[in-house]
Image (spheres, rainbow, N blue to C red):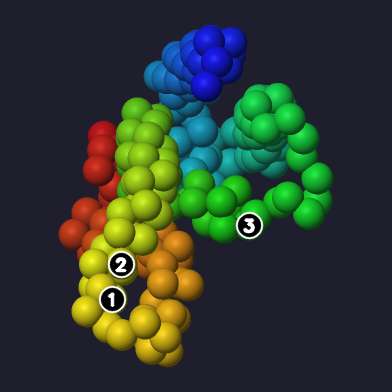
Amino acid sequence: VTASTISVKLAYAGLFLAVLLLLLWLAQAALNSPWGRMMRAIRDNEVAAEAMGKDVTARHLQVFILGSAVCGLAGAMMTTLDGQLTPASYQPLRFTFLIWVMVIVGGSGNNFGAVLGGMLIWYLWVMVEPLGVSLIGGITSGMPDGFWLKEHLLETAAHMRLLTMGLILLLVLRFSPRGLIPER
């Protein structure tokens, strides 16, 4: 590991943190503005909001455009960090399912909850694979070499991530269905 590699990673981390804080500040400002109250009213009851004279279709389009812009920014940042993005490198589990788990665990109606869920789930995603391999290695240490079950468990130990994410999702949905930091 060279100093330039570490400094580049720290620079990326600083840039990503700055973008996260800026987006979080903008989202909170929008949420607490009259526009945000209108959007919550539309979310809660579209018919009532439309009866009050709000253009629900235009607001849906606004949210779609804003969300697409944030996703585009995130995709550009990810591509910059990874160096490339090709259709073959797309992993639905990592780029779709995991993001939903992050939002559900954190709390879908709270920006800070979504950030907390993202950090917590990503940390667990990174840490579970080596821990899972160690755990399976310990469990299978008493089995004879060449035993089919031992080989199967060692080959599939990397899938502990999937099991862990599913278990976390089930536990959160069971015991805290609104997430760790629910909407107020």
Q: Position of residue 151 (x, y in %)?
A: 43, 80
Residue 137: give its label. Answer: 2
Q: Position of residue 103 (x, y in %)?
A: 42, 44
Q: Which residue is mark 1?
A: 140
Mark 3, mark 2: which one is toward the viewer? Answer: 2
Residue closest to the eye, 126 or 70: 126
- Quadrant where the C terminus sits is top left
Callout 3–callout 2 Cβ contact below 8 Å: no
Where is 177 relative to 163, above or below?
A: above
Q: Position of residue 169 (x, y in %)?
A: 34, 60
**Which residue does the image show at 41% across and 72% down from the upper left?**
154
Residue 104: give its label. Answer: none
Q: Amino acid at mark 1?
A: Thr
Q: Residue furthest left?
A: 175
Give the mark nearer the N terminus: 3 vs 1: 3
Looking at the rendered structure, the secondary structure element under dot 2 is: helix
